[in-house]
């Protein structure tokens, strides 16, 4: 075992503790949760008094907007919890039964997949909302905007599939390395 000099220890301590620079970012994301909650409540307050006279399409569009906001809220919460736990420090919730099941077990790869899944869902809802507005007689048809929305949605789907394939390949590689390690240890110790 090699001895480390004082300079190396100090540098490593600075590097390790630099993870706390991310803490204000997560506090900012908590503030963004409040911003999204405000938008959600505003949408409900605006829609509920007009509910009796609303057309079905308008009700569906309003509900889609609320679902869109809830998915965005979930997305931010996933980033806050898993990002903080993966990169800064474990969140101590004691023995709370309210701790989400995935919290503390979601690694960077899992977080990435949840993020892309949420982005695809948000994109799908936005696309559905755009198609729903086409049914309105006074809505101008913007073919270029709709085309770009479809292209972006398909890009998000393709990105998600590629992320999944990359994670699958990485898992196969890790499993192969682990098998190779076990085989070489068995050969070295004489076990078969």
Image (cartoon, rainbow, N blue to C red):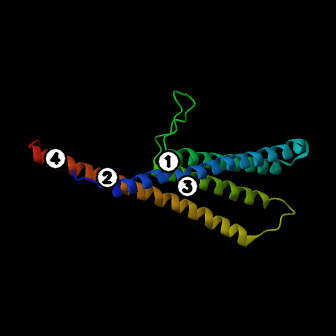
Q: Nearer the viewer, mark 1 or mark 3?
A: 1
For the point 62% across and 45% down, the residue is 74
First-in-chain label (4 vs 3): 3
Q: Callout 3: few (<14), some (14-19), or many (20+) C-alpha neighbours within 10 Å?
A: many
Q: Callout 4: few (<14), some (14-19), or many (20+) C-alpha neighbours within 10 Å?
A: few
x, y (%) of residue 69?
A: 70, 49
Find numbered disc 4 in the image and state the secondary structure of the residue it sits on. helix
Find numbered disc 2 in the image and state the secondary structure of the residue it sits on. helix
Q: Which residue has dot 1 on it? A: 88
| Residue 113 in view here | no
Q: Which residue has dot 3 on it? A: 116
Q: Which residue has dot 2 on it? A: 174
Q: How far is mark 2 from mark 4, CA to CA? A: 16 Å
For the point 74% across and 47% down, the residue is 66
First-in-chain label (4 vs 1): 1
First-in-chain label (2 vs 4): 2
Q: Which residue has dot 4 on it? A: 185
């Amino acid at each position: 075992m090699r001895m480390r000099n004082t300079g190396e220890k100090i540098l490593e301590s600075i590097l390790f503790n630099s993870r706390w620079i991310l803490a204000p970012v997560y506090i900012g994301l908590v503030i963004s949760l409040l911003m999204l909650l405000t938008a959600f409540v505003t949408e409900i307050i605006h829609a509920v008094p007009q509910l009796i006279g609303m057309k079905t399409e308008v009700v569906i569009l309003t509900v889609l907007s609320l679902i869109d906001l809830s998915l965005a809220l979930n997305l931010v919460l996933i980033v806050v919890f898993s990002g903080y736990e993966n990169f800064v420090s474990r969140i101590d919730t004691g023995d709370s039964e309210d701790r989400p099941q995935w919290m503390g077990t979601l690694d960077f790869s899992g977080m990435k997949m949840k993020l892309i899944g949420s982005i695809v869902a948000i994109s799908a809802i936005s696309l559905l909302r755009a198609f729903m507005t086409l049914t309105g007689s006074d809505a101008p048809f913007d073919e270029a905007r709709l085309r770009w929305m479809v292209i972006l949605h398909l890009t998000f789907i393709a990105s998600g599939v590629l992320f999944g394939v990359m994670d699958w390949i990485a898992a196969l590689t890790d499993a192969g390395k682990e098998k190779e390690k076990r085989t070489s240890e068995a050969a070295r110790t004489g076990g078969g």
